[in-house]
Amino acid sequence: MSLKETSKYISLILRHKPETIGIHLDEHGWANVGELLEGIGKTHTISMEILEEIVRTDEKQRYSFNKDKTLIRANQGHSVPVDVELEEVAPPEVLYHGTGEKFRASIEQEGLKPKSRLYVHMSADTETARKVGMRHGKPVIFRIQARKMQEDGYIFYKSVNGVWLTNAVPAAYLQVIV
Ligand code: HQG
């Protein structure tokens, strides 16, 4: 089993379905490392060394340990309601959101919604947005007037791995770019 597959499984557990291996996340999204290793070990090849390698080498830096590495959590991307103590940050003039062409009409009508996750995910660059969009078929990129939204009272957060997050984006702040 590749590290990537194991990482995907960890992401499922730490963001969406901890019950899959019978563990619990605390209110800040932390899971007990010992319990995680034991639970994952039932179906995947894992050890503390492998887990440390996954955390260290993950291309999106999706996970963090606490100081003594007894706890681990996903930095963002959750559907379960946890408070990962996101930092409120003033956004740049514009941010980008990549999605699938099939969602375009609905988004143009009702704006961006978090759907199954806690927040709408955005990036500061179009390349990341394009990659995220490609996960949903033919990609479409929306430009978000983030600074203007903030001036109008909307709050933006930046996760420790650099993903921009907000609760929702009304259609008035959106524009498709080509
Ligand atoms: C769409 C990955 C119709 C939205 C990425 C998106 C990201 C609407 C989909 C992170 C809509 C939800 C998140 C509306 C939003 N009508 N469709 N009104 N509003 N949508 O996977 O942003 O690799 O939950 O455009 O890199 O694609 O997992 O969100 O297409 O950062 O770490 O509903 O996941 O990171 O899809 O991806 P998702 P996302 P990881």
Image (cartoon, rainbow, N blue to C red):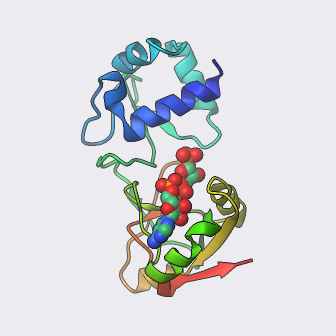
Is 97 or 146 nearer to us in this picture?
A: 97
User: Where is residue 144 shown, x and y percent of the image?
Assistant: 56, 77
Q: Considering only vertical position in the picture, is 33 above or below 89?
A: above
- Please tell me which residue is depicted at 29% across the width and 34% down the height of the picture: 25
Q: Residue 22, image x and y in percent?
A: 29, 23
One can see residue 124 in this view: yes
Residue 113 x %, y %: 42, 68
Q: Residue furthest front?
A: 102
Whether residue 163 can be seen here: no
In this orientation, which residue lies closer to the viewer: 86 or 144?
144
Q: Is residue 125 left or right of 169 when viewed as pictured?
A: right
Q: Quadrant of residue 29?
A: top left
The residue nearer to you, when weighing 46 against 140, is: 140
Horizontal arrangement in the rendering, residue 138 relative to residue 40 (left or right): right
Residue 43 place in picture, x, y as percent: 48, 15
Q: For the view shown, which residue lies furthest in the left direction? A: 27
The residue positioned 63% from the left and 56% from the top of the image is: 132
Quadrant where the image shows the C terminus: bottom right
- Residue at image position (45%, 44%) is 75
In the image, is residue 70 above or below residue 145?
above
Q: Determine whether 63 is above or below 139 in the image.
A: above
Q: Quadrant of the N terminus?
A: top right
Residue 27 relative to residue 44: left or right: left
Instruction: Give the total number of marks visible in the rendering.
Output: 0
What residue is at 51 percent from the left and 75 percent from the top?
Answer: 107
